[in-house]
Image (spheres, helix red, strand yellow):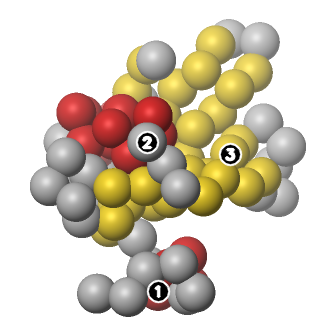
Amino acid sequence: MDIEASARKHGVADDDMLHAVRNHWRGFETDDPAVTMYIGSATTAEPLEVGVVDDDQGTAVIHAMPARPKFLTGWWKP
């Protein structure tokens, strides 16, 4: 899976992005049907939100950051 420069904007390590996608506990489509948002944990157990695009050019991570409360409500209790 490729990782685009935009995914690195918030300083999330590549290994953490991939770990969160591979071990996500929630995934849902966005307004763009080619983009899926995954909520999962980094290798450090920090919850992340990771956006992945899957289109005719392949699959790539395009967004990654610590998960915002709107994605954790009902799923995560720190």
Q: What's the residue at 43%, 19% (across, down)?
A: 2
Q: Decide which of tag 1 and tag 2 comes sooner along the chain.
A: 2
What residue type is disc 2 on? Answer: Asn
Q: Name the residue under label 3.
A: 36
Q: Mark 2 points at which residue?
A: 23
SS under mark 3: strand
Counting from the top left corner in percent of width and height, residue 13 is at 18, 42
Q: Quadrant of residue 56?
A: top right
Counting from the top left corner in percent of width and height, residue 60 is at 52, 26
In the displayed structure image, the side of residue 50 where residue 13 appears, left or right: left
Q: What's the residue at 68%, 45% (across, down)?
A: 36
In the displayed structure image, the side of residue 3 where residue 38 appears, left or right: right
Can residue 51 be seen at all in this image of the molecule?
yes
What residue type is disc 3 on? Answer: Thr
The mark tally for this picture is 3
SS under mark 1: helix
Counting from the top left corner in percent of width and height, residue 39 is at 50, 58
Q: Decide which of tag 3 and tag 2 comes sooner along the chain.
A: 2
Q: Decide which of tag 3 and tag 1 comes sooner along the chain.
A: 3
Counting from the top left corner in percent of width and height, residue 34 is at 78, 36
Q: Tell which tag, 1 or 2, sits nearer the viewer.
A: 2
Q: Is residue 8 above or below residue 40?
A: above
Can residue 50 be seen at all in this image of the molecule?
no
Sort mark 3 into few (<14), some (14-19) or many (20+) by Cα contacts within 10 Å. some
Q: Are marks 1 and 2 in contact (CB under 8 Å)?
A: no
Q: Mark 1 points at which residue?
A: 69
Q: Quadrant of residue 18?
A: top left
What residue type is disc 1 on? Answer: Pro
Q: What's the residue at 38%, 88% (across, down)?
A: 77
